[in-house]
Image (cartoon, helix red, strand yellow):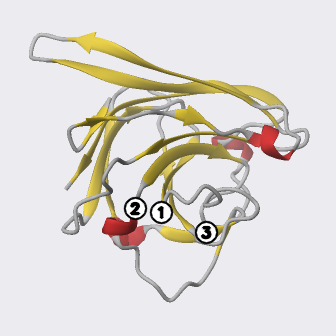
Amino acid sequence: MTFLGKTMKWHRLDDGVMGGQSQTLHAVESTEDDDSSSSVLHFSGQINTQGGGFCSIRSPIEGGMPSDTKALRISFVGDGKTYKFLLSDGNKSAFGPSRRSPSWQIDIPTSRNGNKETIIISLDTLTPSLQGGPVETGVKLNPVEVKEMGFMLSLKLSNGKPNPVETYGEGIFPFALKIHSIEAV
């Protein structure tokens, strides 16, 4: 999978960093159809709400995003769960408990019907967040400073409220999101 013409280098970050037992699997699968060849990012695994409750994948954005980026177009096939899309400055502590700069998040509700969905996310609609909750920064997201992106399934939504059982799950449960493309627009 590429973004801005560069291959993304995905890695996982699960609730194990705080003693949880959730597990993420991720893989990029090459696909070919009648018109072109591309790749699909598979983000799947098992959430365990005992001691944590989140799974995520992250990738650096080599060189950052262009200054004129206003939005991102993401195509995916979901499983009925509500995921989060994340952007950050790439600071190693940007997503962990000691982070000093916010990640910028937005919820991505998905359908269970197995059809490909496409959304356009205006950068102005992302919420700054620290330690799973929204914060007021008084600062707008600057695309030039964005050096990392990610996807997450979490017990909390971007507004800090609980992700409902209907769009998250309970106990120990599987999840699967297939990301077909991410484009700056």
Q: Are marks 1 and 2 in contact (CB under 8 Å)?
A: yes
Please state if 123 lies on the left or on the right of 159 as rendered.
left
Residue 175 can be seen, yes or no: no
Closer to us: 106 or 56: 56
Q: Which residue is mark 3?
A: 129
Q: Which residue is mark 2?
A: 146
Q: CA separation, marks 3 and 1?
A: 13 Å
Q: Residues within 10 Å of mark 2 (few under 14, many from 20)?
A: many
Say which label, 3 or 2, has the lower sequence index.
3
Q: Position of residue 62 (x, y in %)?
A: 34, 47
The residue most toward the left is: 35
Please state if 168 lies on the left or on the right of 97 as rendered.
left
Q: Which residue is mark 1?
A: 89
Closer to us: 160 or 137: 137
Q: CA separation, marks 3 and 2?
A: 14 Å
Closer to us: 118 or 57: 57
Residue at 18% from the left image edge and 68% from the top image edge: 68
Q: In the rendered picture of this protein, how many numbered marks are placed on residues?
A: 3
Q: Residues within 10 Å of mark 1 (few under 14, many from 20)?
A: many
Q: Residues within 10 Å of mark 3 (few under 14, many from 20)?
A: many
3 vs 1, front mark: 1
Which amino acid type is shown beneath numbered disc 1?
Asp
Which amino acid type is shown beneath numbered disc 3?
Ser
Which amino acid type is shown beneath numbered disc 2?
Val
Please state if 91 lies on the left or on the right of 146 as rendered.
right
Residue at 22% from the left image edge and 44% from the top image edge: 4
